[in-house]
Amino acid sequence: MSVTKSTFNKACKAFLQTQPVIQEKKDQLKAVQKESKAHVAIIKTYMTANDVTEFTVGGFTFTNDISERLPWSEKNVAQLIEPDSDFFERYREQFAKTKQQFKCRPPKRQREAEDEPVHSA
């Protein structure tokens, strides 16, 4: 798919124009989420104090259970395996996967919107 320079510049301009609207909505949502978080904390406290493991309110199901986590890391496993073993090299060869990732990060607070899009290699 080929994109003309004109279409690209229009998309960049439109993208930048939508950002203030998105930020406004995020700020509104943040206030509501903060209020909701306080309610969830009360529900959690009640459930913990009364040994309630599951509670449903308005279709939302809250669960309060204890689970065991067993983190695996190369460092932890290396402590159990012979130091001169090529285990990790063989593991990487067999199971390593490479993928392409496309991200869009917002600009830092100091750098607000610029008129021209910045291209980097």
Image (cartoon, helix red, strand yellow):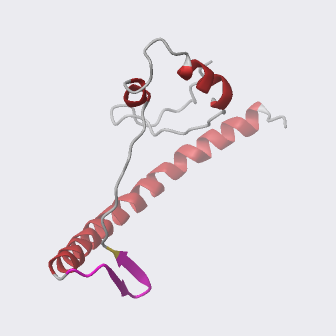
- Above or below, comparing residue 99 to residue 13 in the picture: above
- Toward the top, the furthest residue is 84
User: Quick check: is 54 in the magenta stretch?
Assistant: yes
- Residue 41: in sight, yes or no? yes
What residue appears at the point 44 percent right and 28 percent down from the top-left corner? 74
Q: Residue furthest bottom?
A: 58
Give the image location of residue 103, x and y in percent: 56, 38
User: Which residues make up the magenta segment?
Assistant: 51-62
For residue 5, what is the image quadrant?
top right
Judging depth in this view, the residue of 30 and 46 nearest the camera is: 46
Tell me: 7 left or right of 85: right
Question: Relative to 33, is 25 on the left or the right?
Answer: right
Rendered location of residue 102, percent (x, y):
61, 37
Which residue is depicted at the point 85% across and 37% down?
Answer: 1
Q: Residue furthest left?
A: 49
Q: Nearer the viewer, residue 79 or 71?
A: 79
Residue 35 position, x and y percent, is 25, 71
Please state, as top left, top right, bottom left or bottom right, where the C terminus lies in the image.
Answer: top right
Frontmost residue, 22 versus 46: 46
Residue at 17% from the left image edge and 74% from the top image edge: 45
Find residue 28 and report its image quarter: bottom left
Residue at the image point whose x is 22% and y is 79% from the top: 47
